[in-house]
Image (cartoon, grey):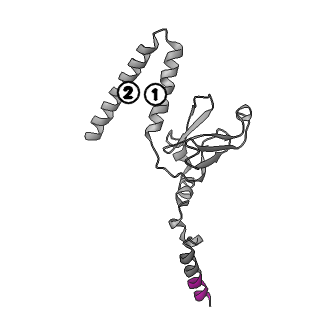
Amino acid sequence: KVKCQKIYRLLIDSVRKRPSKSDDFDCPNSLVSQINKLEINEFESEEAWYISFSQRKCYKLYSFGHCYTVEKPKQELFKDAKKIYWRCEDYPVCSGRGNSNGLIPHLKVTKSHIHPPNPEIKMKLKALEELKDLALKSTEPARTIIQNSQLKLEIQNMGEAIMLSL
């Protein structure tokens, strides 16, 4: 009787084209569950948690190739919040979501993204942050600061290309 029930359930699931709980690996959210099960020491890396600021001076979180902006709470209540809800930077297109316990690392992904991760975003965020710091601290003209930072990026990219070719 139990065997018949299992077969019946598999038949119904295949007709509905919805995976059963036992077939979690077929589910598109299985990636979400895999990311959430990563070990704690992996979350200490910048790949798992890197915070910068958006153009509107709001927090922007980079995690495993995806960028998130704060959805809740409002900016005024953000620093005291015990739980922060993040949404994908490409919000109207992508419905990726996650949450964290304040600004303490470990983003729990609650809804997966519809686009592939882009690890180059972190380099872009770091470069923009350095450029803004230089602009605030330096007395040089803006064009000179931009040219110098572009040269640094080109040298870094050439170094990475050489390392990859070896």
- Residue 71, compared with residue 112, is above or below; it is above
Quarter of image, res 104: top right
The residue at the point 46 percent across, 32 percent down is: 124
The residue at the point 48 percent across, 30 percent down is: 126
Q: Farthest residue to the left: give it.
A: 166
Chain-order first, disc 2 or disc 1? 1
Q: Farthest residue to the front: give it.
A: 92
Quarter of image, res 82: top right
Q: In front: 121, or 42?
A: 121
Stretch in magenta:
1-8
- Residue 99, compared with residue 5, is above or below; it is above
Which structural element holds mark 1? Answer: helix
* Residue type beneath disc 2: Leu
Where does the image place residue 73, in percent across and percent down from the top left? 72, 39
Q: On the picture, is 33 further left or further right than 120?
A: right
The residue tagged 2 is 153
Q: Farthest residue to the bottom: give it.
A: 1
- Quadrant containing the N terminus is bottom right
Where does the image place residue 157, in percent across and percent down from the top left? 34, 32
Which label number is shown at residue 127? 1
* Residue type beneath disc 1: Ala
The residue at the point 31 percent across, 31 percent down is: 159
Where does the image place residue 21, in percent across and percent down from the top left? 59, 70
Which structural element holds mark 2? Answer: helix
* Marks 2/1: CA–CA distance: 8 Å
Q: Is residue 6 magenta?
A: yes
Which label number is shown at residue 117? none
Where does the image place residue 34, in percent across and percent down from the top left? 53, 57
| Circles 2 and 1: CB atoms closer than 8 Å | yes
Report the predominant secondary structure element of the magenta stretch.
helix
Q: Is residue 163 magenta?
A: no
Q: In front: 71, or 92?
A: 92
